[in-house]
Image (cartoon, rainbow, N blue to C red):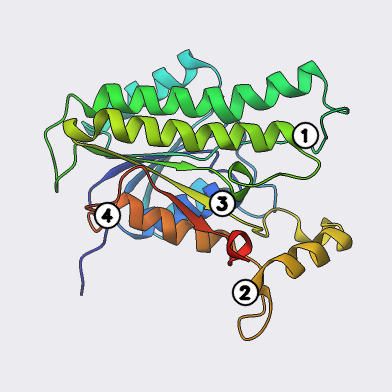
Amino acid sequence: MPSKRLQDRVCIVTGAASGIGRAIAILFAREGAQVVILDPRTDPVEGGETTLDCIQRAGDKAKAYPVDVSIWDELDQAVSATIQEYGALHVMVNNAAIYTGTNLLETTQADWDKVMAVNLRGVFNGCKRAVQQMLTQQPLAEARGRIVNISSQHGMIACPGDIAYGVSKAGSVYITRQIAADFAARGIVCNAVAPGKILTGRTDAIDEDSMRYSRSRTPMAGPPLGRLGKPVDVANAALFLASDECTYVNGANLMVDGGWTAA
């Protein structure tokens, strides 16, 4: 049998209780990683068993800590506990994010601060703590460690009706490029994945007008594929960026949007 792509790697995934983070954690575990889930909640938005239970039921390896990534001490303690138990941190996936669904005039100061705390400070915290550890490690397959930030197509184009989310995702693209430029020579690889319209959570509750708009903007929503994105589409891209196959890609923001931004 072919070797698993993340065999014996220690991978942290934030916001992995639901949606895209859940798909990444499950796929990484299936590919041989020791997955550590950082999320303040355990129950998935889409319902069903927890991510931890799903991974362990399949016979794969995972652990979970209830962490708010916007709080440095909580994230620091969880990462330190992971390193103490497993000896290294090979991959950090900064996925945790929230949104308000409000435009400029509707967005309050509290709305803005809450989104920036999770979506931008949380990414900063995750990147900083990962780099601190990775710099202490010996290179493994041409890298001391790999960081994968989950950005969004709305970090590259306007995000109608959600200004705070769009700005925060633009920030995650910038921090990805800055870290890649600053730490490549020291063996750290940092990339991002930018999802387009991905059907997560309670898909039965998605507004029909929003669905029609997304389908009209996404070339791959037409024939022959005929669908919008799934969490596993993003997870597959994250897997590549986390694996040893990603040898000469650094500072990239990989679009997984079905062609939305190309159209």
The total number of labels drawn is 4
Give the Cα separation between the discs numbered 4 and 2.
Answer: 25 Å
The residue under label 4 is 246
Residue positioned 63% across, 62% down in the render = 260
The residue under label 2 is 220
CB contact under 8 Å: marks 4 and 1: no
| In-front residue for pair 142/178 | 178
- Which amino acid type corresponds to the residue marked 3 in the rendered image? Ile
Determine the residue located farthest toward the bottom in the rendered image: 224
Sequence-wise, the earlier of marks 4 and 2 is 2
Residue positioned 62% across, 34% down in the render = 41
Sequence-wise, the earlier of marks 4 and 1 is 1
Task: Label 2: state its secondary structure.
Answer: helix
Residue positioned 58% across, 66% down in the render = 259
Sequence-wise, the earlier of marks 2 and 1 is 1
CB contact under 8 Å: marks 4 and 2: no
- Number of the front mark, 2 or 1: 2
The residue under label 1 is 100
| In-front residue for pair 205/186 | 186
Give the Cα separation between the discs numbered 2 and 3.
Answer: 19 Å
Q: In the picture, which quadrant includes the C terminus?
A: bottom right
Looking at the rendering, which quadrant does residue 189 occupy?
top left
